[in-house]
Amino acid sequence: MSTEKQFYLDAETCIEELLQRNPTTATFLGDHRWDDKLSDSSPAAVAEQRRWVGAWLEKFEGYDTGGWSKDAHIDRTLMIQVAKSLIRTIDKVRGHERYPGNGPDEARGHPRGVRP
């Protein structure tokens, strides 16, 4: 049986890695540890991001949640939906292809895929 404690450790790791992999998103959310970096939207990086998110989604969906608190169930659902949203953005929205010059926009303060 998967424990709530393990889920929360995994969720924290996932969020930390997500912010590190997407430094402009981290800055947009108020985390300034990676202010000196831009997100990598190269095809290889996008493919790796897709693989990475898919692995987290599989992990979160695979938890045995029997005996978990209502809050833990809700938090797990949120992590699953965040992962699905990221996958949908990569697979369907394809902002990395629509805005291939996104790096310079990020440098001007516009987060990935968000333009004035």
Image (tube, rainbow, N blue to C red):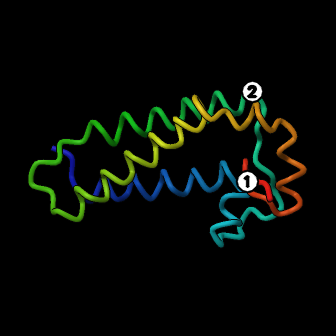
Could you say which is closer to the camera, residue 115 or residue 69?
115
Residue at 51% x, 38% y: name it: 53
Front label number (1 vs 2): 1
What secondary structure is found at the residue carrying circle 1? Answer: loop
Q: Residue furthest front?
A: 116
Q: Amino acid at mark 2?
A: Pro
In which quadrant of the rendered image does the C terminus lie?
bottom right
57 displayed left or right of 98? left
The image shows residue 16 at horizontal and vertical percentages of 55, 57
Q: Amino acid at mark 1?
A: Val
- Would you name the residue on which mark 1 appears? 114
Marks 1/2: CA distance?
19 Å
Residue at 18% x, 42% y: name it: 64
In which quadrant of the rendered image does the N terminus lie?
top left
- Would you name the residue on which mark 2 appears? 43
Q: Residues within 10 Å of mark 1 (few under 14, many from 20)?
A: few
Could you say which is closer to the camera, residue 102 or residue 49?
102
Q: Residues within 10 Å of mark 2 (few under 14, many from 20)?
A: few
Residue at 31% x, 59% y: name it: 75
